[in-house]
Amino acid sequence: MIHSIRLCFVLLAIGVFVAACGDDGETTSATAASPISIGVAAIKITPYGQNPDWGGAVTVSGIWGEEFTDDNGNGRYDRGEHFVDDPFNGELDHSSGNKYNGIYMAGFGENRIAKGILDDLWARALVIQGPHKKIALVSVDSVGEVKRGAYYGFAHAEAMVDPALKLDAILYSSTHDHQSPDALGLWGPTQFDDGKFPRYLQFIDKMVARAINQAGAAANMKTVNVIAASSNPHSDPTLLGLQVRTGCRPPWFFDEELRALQFVGNDGATVATLINWATHPESLESKNEMISSDFPHFIRQRVEQSLGGTAVYFSGDLGAAEIVGDTCVGNADKRADGTNEFDTRDTVGYARTGQIGNLVGDAVLRALAKGDHLDVADVEVKTDSYYIPGSNDLFAFANQIGLLDLDMSAFDVSHCPAGTALCAPVDQHLLTLKDRAGKPLVQLLTIPGEIFPELVYGISRNKRTDCPAADTGAAHEPAIADAMSAKYKLFLGLSPDELGYIVPGYDFYAPPSIDEEATDVCKGHAYDESHPGRTSPSHYHESLSLGLNVAASVNCHSLKLLGKDADAAANGACQRVGF
Amino acid sequence: MPASRVLEITPIRIAALILTLVLGLRPALAHVEMVHGQLLELCERADVVVVAKILELANDDTATIEPLAILSGTAIDRTAIAANGNLARGEIHVLFLSRAAALQNLMPRGVVFLTDTTQAASLRRLIQSLRHALAQSEAARPDAVRAALMPCLTSPMTALRYDCAMTFNRLVRDGHGPTPRERRELDRLLARPDADPALAILLR
């Protein structure tokens, strides 16, 4: 009897094994339980209205900020109006004491105080767990958090993450939303006044930690299968003509790929969708005075309404890549109908932003409907930490006069060559989803700023060709994408820091001073016969770049993470930065 | 406010409207606007430069100011100006005003020179020496402007000091470097224990 039972178990076990094997002996995803689980959370960080976690004041408009008397009735604080100082801000940052602390919006000039909201801002976290590793990915609707601020930043959030989650790595990223509060200090009431709101930035840190803790909690983790998809204007013409280069800066090259990972539970319900696109979210432009997460709001909303679950949007390699209608107006590529209704300033506003977001959201849905069902067996993460010596006087000046409020114990100049004004600590991560043979299916690389897409896809193939005389002669940085073997390559920009633009060396013209952009010999030249309005502008991006060597440092360390150390060591740009 | 007050068309409201229209026609602002030394352009464009207290700000962006000291141009009495969004009630500012339609503040958004009445004499010297320098021949102008800016590098007015430093540095970059005497003065200034370290960055 006992023997019979044992025989039954053996036969049953063989049966299960046979059922779980395909013709080639590999286990198929149809029968094997996925070893991957996901948790996701979305926490509002909108500085508006009542929120039990907000300990500060709320102004009459509903926007958070110190209470004030609106003498001129314009719905916002103006310097000189009486306000009630919240001493907590001064405790966090002494220069914020006895000055008005409220929501100055990020970018497009100083003193743009928020008067209301159009939609919410979020801290969204996605925790992915494999057999060996557990990693959190965080996206914040912010112009650019830094990791190591003096009293704020992702390192402060990380200190509040539950150690019981046993996370192996946390990958932070900002969407670069210019309709969110100033997180960098650059857009206060005047050009030399800090625009950050210390109590609010600390609130963000708490909500980031909460998002991670909620997403990674055991009860929230669900076994999932992974669907990956990508799209571009060639495969999906609805994406045509949505990207332009800042001021038409050549080359006319973009990361055109729209990428998505859909995580589907055993019950068939979507748990989360990760979306990755490489365009500045600033469709609402300079005249807007309402908080919004810009077009990512509509992309997420569209995807969530259709698939369910929580959508998490990450900006990728968006350096010099802007949304149509932002700059280079009138010179964008045509859309499928031969015109481009977005290539104008006339329609800038929330309706247009919704149109663009919905277009991209629909493109995500179409791509996922035809996506690859991945047989993910393992999750791996690698981390590289290093320092980049900054040579940008504007950043040094902004830090010196107290706009940036960096943690100078972390920005320790002893890690950089003598004379370095700003020595930036950098963390880079490579997250890989692998199949059972260990082959990478998805590679996700973090980039600590706004990298030009030609640095990702290769300078030699994608450099500007309009002006050989402008080539600085600097060695080309190694292409990142060439070193990635997975079919699906994702990039998390502004992760974990916003270190500014990452510009290739062959076209890097250092600003002559903090108040002047460099020019090259082809400034003003038209470079595309079919688009005569596309002319070569001054070198705006370099004025907001940590320096020439950022690109080489980031690309060479990226290759190291990708296991291509020898290629990096042989590269001239890597040698220049002592890699 | 009575309806008649709202609808009242005054020269200052016309000026504010014109200013709004002109600013509205400017190209889109960059995501991150660069800081620039503004002083020379302001001196060139202004009809009147005053130290003034801001008495009232209306929600149509007009301000009532009380002039405390005339630094350049003809005297003005308490008056309303197009504020250009930079002014704050109760504060004392250096204002560069144009008489284009009515008086309007020329300071670009974000540029504010806060001061107090004790600075009036040194400010008057600065503005007058800059205007004198700007009136020089093209060949003599850069050196004269640079010399006029030297005292401003130690101004207690932070924003003005940085503006002067940026303007000074622009002249140096354009090939109009300091004289040996000015160089020694600069070295002494930057070596002082109480020197502003940010100034050294601007003058690099």
Image: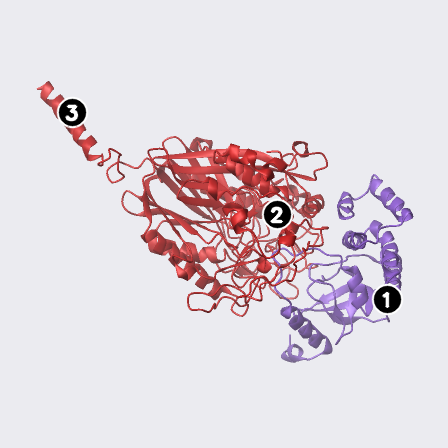
- CB contact under 8 Å: marks 2 and 1: no
Residue type beneath disc 3: Val
Visual hue assigned to chain A: red
Which quadrant would residue A245 be assigned to in this image?
bottom right
**Residue B1 versus residue A150: which sits nearer the camera?**
A150
- Do marks 2 and 3 share a subunit? yes
Q: Residue furthest left?
A: A1
Circle 1 residues within 10 Å: few <14, some 14–19, many ≥20: many
Residue B72 bears which disc, if any? 1
Separation of residues labelled 2 and 1 (CA atoms): 49 Å
Q: Chain of mark 1?
A: B
Q: Quadrant of the N terminus of chain B?
A: bottom right
Percent x, y of residue B86: 70, 62
Residue drawn 57% across and 55% down?
A: A465
Residue type beneath disc 2: Tyr
Separation of residues labelled 2 and 3 (CA atoms): 66 Å
Separation of residues labelled 3 and 1 (CA atoms): 102 Å
Question: Disc 2 designates what residue?
Answer: A506
Question: Disc 3 designates what residue?
Answer: A10
Of discs 2 and 1, which sits in the foreground?
2
